Every structure is written in structure tokens, then in C-alpha cells.
Image: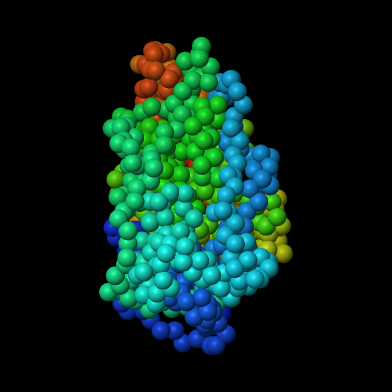
Amino acid sequence: MISSSRRSHRTAHGLPRLATAVAASATGVALVTGMTTGAVPAFAATPAQNALQRQFGAAAAEFHVPAGVLLAVSYQQTRWDSHQGAPSTTGNYNVMGLTQVDAAAVTAALAKGPGPEADGRGDGTEPKPAKGAPVRPKVQDGPALHTLDAAAKLIHRPAADLKRDAAQSVRGGAALLAKYQKEAGKAASADPGAWYQAVARFSQAGDPAGADAFADRVFATIRTGAARHTDDGQSVVLAATPSLRVDRPVARMSAAAVAPAADDTTPECPVELDCDFKPAAYALTNPSDLTSFGNYSKANRPDDGDKIQYIVIHDTEGGFDSSIGLFQNPANQDSSHYIVRSSDGHVTQLVHTKDIAWHAGNKSLNMHGIGIEHEGYALPTDRPTWYSEQLYQSSAALVRYLAARYDIPLDRQHIIGHDDIPGPIQSYVAGMHWDPGTFWDWSHYMDLLGAPVCANLGGPLTVGGVVTISPAFDATNQPPVTETADRPENFVYLRTQPDPNAPLINGATTQASDWHDKAVYGTSYVVADIQGDWTAIWYDGQKAWFYNPSGQTGGADNRPGRTVLTPKPGLASIPVYGRNYPEAAAYTPYPGIAPQSVVPLTATVPAGQSYVAGSDAPVQSDFFYSHTIDDSSPNDWTLVVGKDTYYPIRYNHRLAYLKASDVQVGTAVTPGGSTGQNNNS
């Protein structure tokens, strides 16, 4: 055993992280970091660790912007992180999140990218021939993509300085706010509440409602206050001003929301997000073929028996508007239920949650999942390393709403990335997508969901027990990634032996897209062995080792009763499946529906290995038949349910399924305890 009682996660500078709570309000999501309203802790920090705080004060004085406004705007952009001058997924830089994007170059790069799933439906069938080429993603140019250059001109500094130097980023942000305040016809008031219009404009939102949503979050942060040790080791405090009164204009609505919405375009969304609805295509690609439709399947979940169990996090690899356009072209055979804009966190719904969007590349996960796209794209010159805070906050508010509505557990077995989706059949495995990538901050995201991963961890690790991958997302966890500067990552590398020089498992590489050797934050596995500072897990049918001194990158989940699965006695190994389809006999009552093949992947679980079950009870086998656009085929739009049942598991980086008939069900070992087996399984 080794101790994993360390749960506070310390930065490279030895400063403890603050716990984060989330307070939802009618004006959005306000972050309250380790405090109650009005009680902001003071930090004991060295002058070097207070440098950023002083830079905010100096810039506020220089440009006559209230320091609280400047601090809160930066907090809502980046949480005061500089990200070492590297860009976000939408071209924001440094602590103020100022933008510099070459739209033409990005669009050209996106044209060479992976594009949508080869089989959007995820059922192993090729898309029907379409008339006209699929739309490729692009980025629309405009002033919102060039705020860094605009700020650089205002402060007479090279743009490169604002990218790399936090002090110049703060000065540039302050200069922009002062400019916006003046152009709004407002005086440079010392009252933070008088700066609403300038703050709203700073968001660069595409519509008034989005701008107001950003401003509301900024002023909510001023009211509650905030305090944080940044990933750069800076200590920053914004004192709470609970009595702040804001000169807020009458609430403005987006253009899409001004027109009365038809009943079928009312967004399913928490009120504070002010979502709109822009329907994805539901149309034929070949007018003479009723089966050639896109971009989703009509259904009636969960009332039709098709339970919603997962929420899948994606990124767009394209701009917000062009991605919506892609989903509105049936030739793309691709869709998502929602999309979140980076600049202000605006949410647009595209497909009703009762319907099945084609987003995961795996029909079983499409059937039981809700897909949420997040605006983001790779820059041709600078590789992005972070997502915007507005995007995280809106996405988390949406997920909390959906999870409550559909009774989805807020854990990493059910709140998953596109990179967690298994290939439904073996030929699909190599081509499965890997977004949202290695720099999606799962730790922060789960905190925003009100389900912090580390809250369930502590105590000693034990062979046969459960370990949850939980490295800090800061300078203490920067595993090398090919062609990327050092940055916090959300994973640990897995090796063949407890040795830093041992090969990575599966002959894998340090490419970000190579998921075969990575275990990601919040995912849970059964401990296979412990040697010194190294922990081994059962992963991908083998023993895989990761460096875990004192439980710093993987904590023990010693909650009693964690369900684990192992092959039934007498079986040398059992097959692993990429989808949970019914047995052939289940289709017999439905003439016209051909039985779908139930073929395992090449992966297996050998005898003696154990994997954490994704649910305490097995799930039904099912298949939703959706053959034509108008329900005109025999038994069309029918859910076929089989007698076979499956357990979802975390097999490797991705999820998978085991047949319940193949496994013995037990409970994980806990300190001082033993595994309890249920031999009736």
C-alpha cells in the first residue's frame, strides 16, 4: 500500500490550491473560490508571487479603469492564468484573453483536418451518396479576432509583447476597456457599476444577449469576490463588493430570440444561459431516396425506452457560426445537440434532446448520449493549450441542467469526452476522434459541475482497489507532448514497467492524438500492482504502470461497494464489445429490421484482470431502427430491446462493454477488507 491522502494538489511553487464551489444565479454562474460571499481570504505571498496583483493595480491607475473591473474581466476570461503566452483554442492570449487569429490561414488548415466522423450515425453503415460536397469548417474574420492587435496599438507596444508579457496584456486590456467606455459616451468613473457597456463590448460576443451574459458574470464576480493561486504561482485577490449596484441597460435579446419561437424550436436550457435554437438539418441528400437523410434521427427519448445516460464533450475544429452551418447541411451526416461559443459562452441548441444526434461515431453512445460541441480550432502557427473560461462555465451550467433532468450521474463514467467513445467495430477503432484533447481541464470542469473528483479520494491504495487518475492541472503535471511547449495536461503516461525509461504501453507515442498510452483525469481503474512510487492498473488487457508518488497523480477511491468485473471462473478470457446491440432473436417480432451483427472487438479481458463497472447493474441491449426520413419503412423508428445485457467499463482510454453473462461481479478491495463476490452473476 501507498498513501494517497494528499488531495489538496499543490502547485510547483508549493501553494495549496483553493477548493472551488459554484454559485448559480439568475445572472449566470459566479465562481466563489474557497470562501463565502464577502469573505475573500488574504494570501501570504512573496513580492514575486504578488507581481500580477500589482500589475493589475498599475494598469487600472494608468488607464483610469476600476481595478475590480479589470480583475473581474480577466478572471472571467482566463482565471488570471497567462498560459505561458500560448493561445486558447480560439486564439486568445495571456491573462486578458486578447485575440489574434489569421482567419484565412486557420480556414485553410481546417480544410486539411479530419472533418466530421466517417460514419456520423455510428452504426457501421456508409453514408448515402449526397448531391453536393460536404461543407468544410471555417473561421469568419472580423474585429473580434484581432483585439490583441488593437490593444497593442493603444499602448504602443509590439503585439508579441501582449502575447508573452502578462503586464502588457493587462495594460492592453485596460486600454481597450477605457476606449470602449469613452465610445459608449461614459465617463471614466471610479464606480465599477458604471462600466457595464464597456465590459459587455469587451466580450466580443456576436449578439447583445451574449455580451450581456458575459458582463453579468463579470459583475457577479465583483460582488462575490475571488481569490486564486494561478498556474504561474501568482497570488491574486479580488475583494468582494456585495453591495455593488450596476448601471445595467434593459435586457437585450439576441436576434434569434426576438422573433416568436415555434413550439419545436424552444431551447431546452437553464434560464440563465439565454440559449437559442438553430435547427440542424433534417433533410434528404438525394430527393429520390428516403433513406439518404441527415443529420439526426427522430426519436422520443427517454419515453420510448431509450434512456439518456451520457453527456459527450466535443470541440468543433471550426468557428461557431461555420460549425452551425456544417450541422445544417445534410451532406455532412453530422450533428450535435448543442454548441457553446468561446467568447461569451453563448449556447445554441441544434437538435432536441429527445432526438438522436449523430455526434459520437458510435450508435450505442449516440442513442444514449447528448452531444455538446465547444468552439475551438488549432492555429497554424501557435498550438492552442486552453479553452476559455466562459466556455467552461456555460458548458457546466448546461450539463448540470441536463444531468438533473435525465438523472445522469455527474462523474467521469457518464460525463465523457469524444475521446472516451469506443470504436463500435474493430475497423473503426483507429479513426475514432480524440477531442476535446489533452488540455481540456477536467479537474476545473468537474469542480464547476459541483462534483469535484478529489472529494471521493483519500486513504491508502490497495491492490484490487480502485484508483482514480487525478493529477493537478498545473505546472506539476506537464508530461511531454510532441510539438507542444510545456503546459498542464489532463493525463498520465502509462509504461510497461515501473521505470521512467520503460517503453510506453502499446508501442504508443507522445503525440496528443495517440490515446493508447494515456489515462485521463477522473477515470477509474482497478489497481493491479504497487511498487514504490509506481502504481499499475489493469488497462487494455494488460498491466500498465504510472508514476504516482504519495498518490499525487492517482488517488484511492475507497468508497465501499465499488462494483468490479472479472471473467467468470474457468474462462481464459472474455470478449470486449464496442457497442451493446441485441441478440439476433430480438429482431424476430419486427419484420423489415435486419438483425445487427454482435461482433466483439479484437480486445479481450484475460482471466485474473478486473475492471471498474460503469454501472452497478447491467444495461439493456438495444438498437434504434431509423431507416427513412418519414417513418415509411416497416417497423421504422422502432427500439429493439434484447435479452442480453452488458456492463459498460473503462477498458483503456475509452469505454467498452462486457456481456453480463461473461463476468463475475464483485466489489473492489478496500483497506483492511476483501473482495466480495456475487457468484450468481
Give the quarter of the image for residue 344: bottom left
Q: Nearer the viewer, residue 218 or 1?
A: 218
- For residue 452, say whether it is visible: no
- 642 versus 491 height, above or below: above
Q: Residue 263: x, y in percent?
A: 28, 32
- 299 versus 589 height, above or below: below
Query: How is the structure coloured here?
Result: rainbow
- 462 versus 297 height, above or below: below
Q: How many badges with numbers are in the image?
A: 0
Q: Residue 606: x, y in percent?
A: 56, 45
Q: Residue 163: x, y in percent?
A: 63, 66
Which residue is at a point 63% across and 48% down the rendered structure image?
A: 103
- For residue 634, say whether it is visible: yes
Q: Nearer the viewer, residue 257 or 12?
A: 257
Which residue is at a point 36% across and 35% down the rendered structure image?
A: 352
Position of residue 572 in the picture relative to residue 283 (left or right):
right
Which residue is at a point 66% across and 39% down the rendered structure image?
A: 111
Q: Nearer the viewer, residue 606 or 3?
A: 3
Give the quarter of the image for residue 593: top left
Give the quarter of the image for residue 580: top left
Q: Classify the position of the C terminus by image quarter.
A: top left
- 411 versus 486 height, above or below: above
Which residue is at a point 51% across and 27% down the rendered structure image?
A: 330
Q: Residue 104: x, y in percent?
A: 66, 45
The residue sitting at the front extreme is 185
